[in-house]
Amino acid sequence: MTTSTKPSNNLASIDYWQTLNRKSLLRFFLLQQLSSGPMHGYEIGTRIALCCDARPTDAMIYPMLKELETGGYVELENAVINGRKRKIYSLSALGNEAYRASAQAWAMVLPQIETAVKEAGVETPCCTTMVIDSSIIELRGLEPEKQQPANSKDSR
């Protein structure tokens, strides 16, 4: 008797590749966001969501921050912001070195990725890349912890 088993990962699905990309790039984007200055985990996730089209889950963000802290790449400071206790993360000197090394590694592979994408006949979306910095949060006029829920009756 022969049974056909379907692979657990559908490599022909864009969802598979997007999930893989998000997971593998999380550490890089955490370092990138913290390179702009200290921030708490929620803000990091929000900023990553703006550049990557999806917000990493807390179960992805906080263990990674803990791993970076344990490795000496991130420093942690407890603070009270708007009456809430927050853990504020910042890059250490070693974290800045790690960010620079990771950016150099990506710079070496990006041209090959661009070539492969073109060879596959896939057009890259125009004007979808967004540079994230503190001005985006400021432009919105709200810090992340002050934002109203989407279903809030206060629609400003």
Image: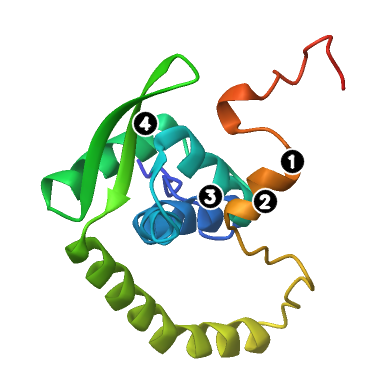
Q: Is residue 95 left or right of residue 120?
A: left
Q: Name the residue beneath numbered marker 2.
A: 136
- The residue sitting at the right extreme is 156
SS class, disc 3:
helix
Q: Name the residue beneath numbered marker 1.
A: 140
SS class, disc 2:
helix
Q: Which tag, 2 or 4, sits closer to the chain's start?
A: 4
**Residue at image point 52% right, 90% down:** 111
Nearest the viewer among 53 and 137 is 137
Q: Nearer the viewer, mark 3 or mark 1?
A: 1
**Residue at image point 67% right, 51% down:** 136
Separation of residues labelled 3 and 1 (CA atoms): 16 Å
Residue 129, quarter of the rendered image? bottom right
Q: Is residue 45 left or right of residue 28?
A: right
Q: Amino acid at mark 2?
A: Ile
Q: Residue 48 in the image: x percent, y percent?
A: 53, 50
Q: In what quadrant of the picture does the C terminus appear? A: top right
**Residue at image point 37% right, 45% down:** 2
Q: Name the residue beneath numbered marker 3.
A: 48
Separation of residues labelled 3 and 4 (CA atoms): 14 Å
> Are discs 1 and 2 less than 8 Å apart at CB?
yes
Separation of residues labelled 1 and 2 (CA atoms): 6 Å
Q: Name the residue beneath numbered marker 4.
A: 59
Separation of residues labelled 4 and 1 (CA atoms): 26 Å
Q: Residue 122 in the image: x percent, y percent?
A: 72, 77
**Residue at image point 58% right, 52% down:** 134
Q: Amino acid at mark 4?
A: Ala
SS class, disc 1:
helix
